Amino acid sequence: MASDNSQNSKRIAKNTLLLYVRMLFIMAVNLYMSRVVLNTLGVVDFGIYNVIAGVVAMFAIISGSLSAAISRFITFELGRGNLSKQKAIFSSSITIQVAIAFVILIVAELIGPWFLNNKMNIPADRLLAANWVLQCTIFSFCFTLIGVPFNASIIAHEKMSAFAYISILEVLLKLAVVYALLISPIDKLISYAILLLVVVIFIQSIYGVYCRVKFKECRMSFNFDKDLLKKMTGFAGWNFIGSSASILRDQGVNIVINLFCGPVVNAARGVAMQICHAVTGFVNNFMTALNPQITKSYATGDFDYMNTLVFKGARFSFYLLLILSLPIFLETELIMDLWLKGMVPEHSIMFVRLILIFTLIESVSGPLITLMLATGNIKKYQIIAGGTNMMNLPISYILLRWCGFADFPEITFIVAIIISVLVLLCRLYLLKEMVNLDVQRFTKEVLVNVVLVSLISAFAPLCIHLICGNSVMEIILEILVCFIFSALTILFVGCNKEERAMIYSQCGKIRNKILNNEK
């Protein structure tokens, strides 16, 4: 068992490394594309695209819960090695997703245009382009939805190299879209929406072909296994609360901001989310590599290894995010100005800082959520934790409409931060009941640890930030100190003796490889 766990840990490290290489490339291209798209479309059109994409994403409330069920059931049965069950789950998943995509298409076409043309804050001369964006986004969403079982299969099999290569191809195609946008003779916003739809269709087709060739269970057939569907829909039914809460928090609040603050503030939020996605992508890559092992260890009854993964996953998710977000937090204004070349939308600087705090808190919860889904026993969990998370939208709406915060949209992120802390406490309490999670140990080894690491890591960079001026060399010095001081703090304060030994060993192997290559 120990040998198997050692191999699993090495697989996690290898898959994480592959996903990081992918993420570095994707992050650089996405940040460049965001700037070019913002400059090409303009602030208003950029805001329109972001808020309309948010309207369509609201329909993920219907599908998100089932998508989580598909991922959980595929990974669980793969851990048990039951091929016939895997085939049944995949076939049922395809049937479910196609049916839901059809339903969402109908509902979106009935509600979407009416809401866009009658309720949203869109300039009259941009309504035609906005309707094109709506249609393209609806179809993009449906194609992505049908591709969920294929993506889940790749991740469950831990074939991260394929996942990385296809993702890199996707971002290269999106880069080509940006250049096509510059020379397009028709409306830029319409061109952008159509070309992104083409990219989505092409990429989802590649996922489908790869899975069909590589995995025996991935054979598309429309099949209904009543018992399996009952279990999956029961799981999805309760997970619907959590999926709804996340989407209402992100996209619902984005729509509320449009109603009371206008598309310019949506553009600021969209820019902030780009930076957030770039930074959190590193943590998501780590969790993408880690999640299958948490689910499989639960499926096989290896609870000691499962707890180890959850505790270490929570800490290292936070560390990875901290080391990247701290210099951005301190020098947000300069980074935004350099990135967007002076076209920084109002409110975006504070949006970035607040959303980084929010994502740091959420990063600790990632392994806890995976563990909860692995158990399949999520009724009470979703009622309490999901119900608490749902309060983001109504509280934000009340504050913006009736409490005079329309000129301070940052309040929506402050609400999200406070609720995120409350939900984290709910998760710990409930998982103690569900899987006997040692909350006292989690508090000491994770929560106290990450707070201490954060305070120490921020001390030296903050002092330099207060002392130094705004010259390029002083800013570079500050960022370097920030990275180095954070890394050292994580190594000597955040890691235990065993983890430091493993890091030293890996660094030694890398050094030896470099020296051998030089010879």
Image (cartoon, rainbow, N blue to C red):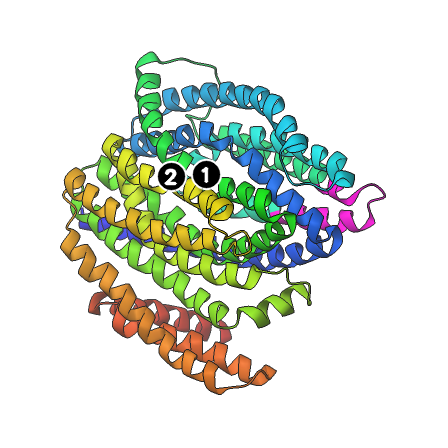
Q: List the single residue furthest toward the right.
A: 185
Q: Is residue 325 above or below residue 53?
A: below
Marks 2/1: CA–CA distance? 7 Å
For this rendering, which residue is in front, 222 or 139? Answer: 139
Residues under numbered marks 2 and 1 in contact, where contact means CB atoms less than 8 Å apart: yes
Q: Position of residue 247 (x, y in %)?
A: 46, 38
Residue 358 can be seen, yes or no: yes
Q: Is residue 458 above or below residue 282?
A: below
Q: Within the magenta stretch, is there residue 31?
A: no
Q: Within the magenta stretch, is there residue 178?
A: yes
Residue sitting at x 58%, y 82%? 470
- Asked whether, in this view, residue 477 is left or right of residue 365, the answer is right
Q: Quadrant of residue 75?
A: top left
Q: Quadrant of residue 140?
A: top right
Q: Quadrant of residue 492?
A: bottom left
In the rendered structure, find residue 248 and report the number of the disc placed on it: 1
* Magenta-tinted stretch: 171-192
Q: Position of residue 473 (x, y in %)?
A: 57, 84
For this rendering, which residue is in front, 139 or 419? Answer: 419
Residue sitting at x 32%, y 17%? 230
* Crowd band around label 1 with a 10 angstrom C-alpha radius: few (<14), some (14–19), many (20+): many
Secondary structure found at label 1:
helix
How many marks the image carries: the answer is 2
User: Which residue carries the number 2 mark?
Assistant: 390
